[in-house]
């Protein structure tokens, strides 16, 4: 049922002049979904308070509650059409009153940015309603009202469908692919870093929060479901930062659907922070990220880093190293050119990584891993504190061309995860001693010495000889057929 509802919402938004692509569809669906979620959450808390003989104080004032402006019900619990607002009146209410009211929460709760109240203000300060037709908006609201956020199984199904919408953005153009890292790759990264209850998990380029959501699922399945542990998992485990408004909103909604009520995601430019000011209280046990690459940062941003470069991903890597606790673990996706670039910043950054961390594993991914991008990437797995002595490389070969029709699947990286524990040498994996790395370049791009040798190319003379032999065979065969006839 939920899947059909999501499809119906997209079909309706497709007809609106203000919504042009999957990016618009998910943005507009997100704010409506968020308000319905908020209504259901407050309803649950109100019922819980009533059972305890208490009165619940609603976050949202009566006029702006979902069951007043969006979906008023009659005595039988059905939509009361005599009270519903639609057309221009609905658009005017949303734009001029609802959004203005919700934006006000940011200033009212600025001292408590981790509360759901602050998140409300932050979200509605960062987006605007793009649905131009009040009749289309009414249809969207009616479809969203069919969705229930009360039961955990409902949230699970909704989170799966929302993830599908995020994945579709990777095919939507307009840089949609930046929001989606293939989930099988994320799960492999989490398996290797193995976050545990009591540890903090951080992504400073959080995007759609895929790393944090998958880490939540991984830890929840393996934890002792005690009240105190659940509270730690909910409130004190997952942290993220995101610069872009749409990604921030999607990330929060994604985490909410995965079961995290008030996500610790901050809307900020991570690279605007001076890495020299990062203190122990700002550091994390596990860092998982796929920072944007190819971006160019301005000189004032570069001043926040010891190794100055305009390459966004290289600045993020410095931030992650500084943000990792001693003994902490990280898994970071980065372009494979990081291993071999000869510019001063790249050489200095590789030296810094090798001397301050144990870069124990490099996972080499093929082109086509990321939807809509043929760029080749590697995943760097490192621990903070001890310098690198040996690096284990694994060249992932799926045995097929990667792309939209053949994406990464959950079986693909099982061998890597299994072998990574003991780091043996195989046809796909090998070990490099740091002692063998040239100190003038710190070049880490080593060709697989264990790969089976490819058959040598034949000389032109050999090819011509074979062609002549084939021609003779063909002529002989044709002659035989003629004789038979």
Image (cartoon, rainbow, N blue to C red):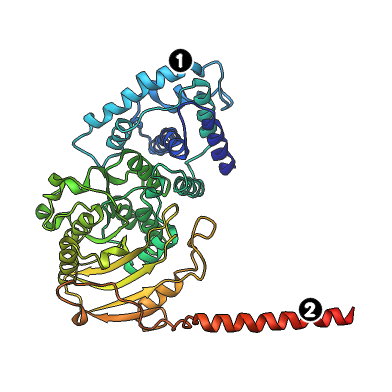
Image quadrant where residue 380 sits: bottom left
Quarter of the image for the C terminus: give it. bottom right
Instruction: Give the number of the disc on residue 235.
Output: none
Q: Which of 356 and 61 is in front in this view?
A: 356
Where 375 sits versus 442, above or below? Answer: above
339 with respect to 190 (left or right): left
Q: Distance between the residues labelled 1 and 2?
A: 83 Å
Q: Nearer the viewer, residue 225 or 267?
A: 267
Q: Residue at x 41, y 26 (%)?
A: 65
Give the foreground label among 1 and 2. Answer: 2
- Circle 2: is it few (<14), some (14-19), or many (20+) Cα within 10 Å? few
Where 295 sits versus 105, above or below? Answer: below
Q: Where is residue 462 in the image (x, y as percent from the top left)?
A: 54, 84
Q: Which of 173 and 102 is in front in this view?
A: 173
- Circle 1: is it few (<14), some (14-19), or many (20+) Cα within 10 Å? few
Q: Is residue 195 visible?
A: no
Quarter of the image for the N terminus: give it. top right
Circles 1 and 2: CB distance less than 8 Å? no
Most distant residue in the right direction: 485
Instruction: Give the number of the disc on residue 89.
Output: 1
Image quadrant where residue 432 sits: bottom left
Disc 1 or 2, which lies upstream in sequence? 1
| Residue on which disc 2 sits | 478
């Amino acid at each position: 049922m939920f899947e059909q509802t999501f499809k119906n919402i997209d079909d309706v938004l497709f007809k609106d002049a203000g919504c042009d692509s999957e990016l618009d569809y998910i943005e507009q669906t997100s704010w409506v979904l968020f308000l319905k979620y908020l209504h259901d959450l407050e309803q649950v808390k109100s019922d819980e308070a009533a059972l305890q003989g208490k009165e619940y104080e609603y976050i949202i004032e009566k006029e702006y509650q979902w069951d007043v402006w969006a979906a008023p019900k009659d005595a039988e619990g059905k939509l009361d059409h005599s009270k519903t607002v639609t057309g221009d009146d609905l658009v005017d209410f949303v734009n001029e009153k609802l959004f203005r009211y919700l934006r006000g929460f940011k200033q009212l709760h600025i001292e408590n940015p981790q509360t759901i109240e602050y998140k409300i203000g932050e979200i509605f300060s960062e987006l605007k309603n793009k649905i131009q037709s009040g009749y289309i908006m009414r249809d969207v609201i009616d479809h969203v009202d069919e969705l229930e956020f009360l039961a955990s199984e409902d949230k699970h199904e909704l989170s799966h469908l929302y993830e599908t919408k995020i994945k579709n953005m990777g095919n939507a153009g307009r840089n949609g692919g930046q929001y989606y890292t293939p989930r099988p790759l994320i799960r492999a990264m989490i398996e290797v870093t193995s976050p545990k209850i009591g540890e903090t998990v951080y992504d400073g380029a959080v995007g759609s929060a895929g790393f944090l959501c998958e880490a939540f699922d991984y830890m929840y399945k393996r934890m002792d479901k005690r009240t105190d542990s659940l509270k730690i998992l909910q409130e004190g485990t997952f942290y993220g930062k995101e610069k872009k408004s749409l990604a921030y909103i999607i990330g929060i909604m994604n985490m909410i659907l995965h079961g995290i009520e008030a996500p610790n995601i901050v809307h900020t430019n991570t690279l605007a922070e001076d890495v020299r000011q990062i203190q122990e209280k700002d550091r994390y046990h596990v860092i998982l990220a796929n920072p944007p690459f190819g971006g160019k940062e301005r000189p004032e941003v570069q001043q926040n880093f010891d190794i100055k470069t305009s390459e966004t991903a290289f600045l993020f890597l410095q931030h992650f190293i500084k943000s990792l606790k001693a003994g902490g673990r990280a898994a970071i996706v980065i372009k494979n050119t990081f291993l071999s670039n000869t510019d001063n910043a790249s050489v200095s950054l590789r030296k810094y990584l090798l001397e301050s961390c144990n870069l124990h594993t490099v996972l080499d991914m093929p082109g086509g891993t990321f939807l809509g991008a043929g760029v080749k990437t590697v995943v760097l797995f490192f621990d903070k504190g001890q310098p690198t002595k040996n690096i284990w490389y694994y060249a992932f070969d799926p045995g097929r061309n990667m792309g939209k029709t053949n994406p990464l699947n959950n079986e693909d990286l099982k061998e890597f995860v299994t072998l990574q524990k003991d780091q043996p040498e195989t046809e796909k994996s090998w070990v490099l001693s740091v002692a063998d790395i040239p100190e003038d370049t710190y070049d880490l791009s080593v060709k697989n010495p264990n790969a089976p040798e490819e058959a040598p190319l034949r000389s032109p003379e050999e090819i011509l000889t074979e062609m002549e032999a084939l021609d003779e065979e063909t002529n002989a065969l044709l002659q035989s057929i003629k004789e038979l006839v």
